[in-house]
Amino acid sequence: MRALVVEDDPGISSGLQASLREAGYAVDACDTLSAGWAALLVEPFDFMVLDLGLPDGDGLDLLGRLRRQPMPVSGRQSLPRRDMPVLIMTARDGVSDRVSGLDSGADDYIIKPFDASELLARVRAMLRRAGGRSSPVIEHGDLVVDPAAHTVLRAGQPVVLGGREFALLLTLLQARPQVLSKARLESSLYGFGEALESNAIEVHIHHLRRKLGDQLIKTVRGVGYFVPRQEPPP
C-alpha cells in the first residue's frame, strides 16, 4: 500500500518515512500543501499522514479540498480519492483542535511527539475501518494474513514472504475481487524515484503463486490481477 506524508519538519518526515517503509508501505513525502496536492493529483495513494502547520497554509485546507472532490463517474475512480483515509499529526493538542480536525474529515488524529508503533497501529486501524473489516487479520480460504505481525499462515503453517511479496498479497486481498492493473500494483509497491524492473510485478506474482498455490491470484490478460471472491461452502 502507498502512503503520502505531508510534513515540513525534515527530521519528523524522514523518521516517519523510515517507519512506514519498514512496516511494508511504499512512501512519498511532501513538505508543503501545494506539493501534497500535486502528488494527490497524479498518484492513487491508499492513505495520507498530514501535518497541520505547513509553510504555505493549514493542513485542514488540504483535507477540506480532498473531501470536496467529486465522486467518480460511471464507476471510474477519480484522482485524488475523496474517501482516502487521512491521519492528522500535529502539535496542536487542544480538544477544540482535535474536534476541528475530525469534523473536517480526518479519520484519526495523533499528537506530536508520538511513538512510531502507536502511529502504525492507528494507520492499521484506519485502513481496517476503511476496508469494512473489524478483525485485525485477513482470512481467505485457508490463508490467515496478519498485517501488524507481517505473518502469513496457510492451512495453519507459516509461509515466509519477502517484503514486497507481502505488500502485494495484502493489496490484492484488500481489493478482492476487484481487478487491479499492473500500473496500480506498481504504484502501491514503489514510491517516486524507486528503481522498478519492467517485470517486477510478474516476478512477485510468480513467487506468491509458488508459495501460496496457483489458484489464489487470477490473471485477466491485458487487464491485471485479482483474488476471486470466496464462494460459501455448499
Image: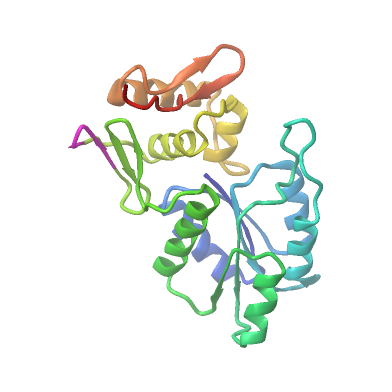
The residue furthest front is: 234
Is 6 situated left or right of 160 in this image? Answer: right
- For the point 56% across and 21% down, which residue is it? 224
Is 42 situated left or right of 182 in this image? Answer: right
- For the point 80% across and 56% down, which residue is it? 68
Residue 156: within the magenta? yes
Residue nearest the viewer, comparing 69 with 148? 69
Magenta: main secondary structure equals strand
Is 158 situated above or below 211?
below
- Picture colour scheme: rainbow
Is 116 situated left or right of 162 in this image? Answer: right
Is 69 situated above or below 7?
above
Residue 165, quarter of the rendered image: top left
User: Percent from the top left, x then y, of residue 211?
Assistant: 28, 25
User: Percent from the top left, x then y, of residue 163?
Assistant: 38, 41
Q: Which residues are magenta?
A: 152-157
- For the point 45% across and 27% down, which residue is it? 229
User: Percent from the top left, x then y, of residue 208?
Assistant: 36, 26
Looking at the rendered structure, the number of numbered marks drawn on it comes to 0
Is 176 situated left or right of 210 in this image? Answer: right
Is 12 situated above or below 135?
below
- For the point 47% across and 21% down, which residue is it? 202
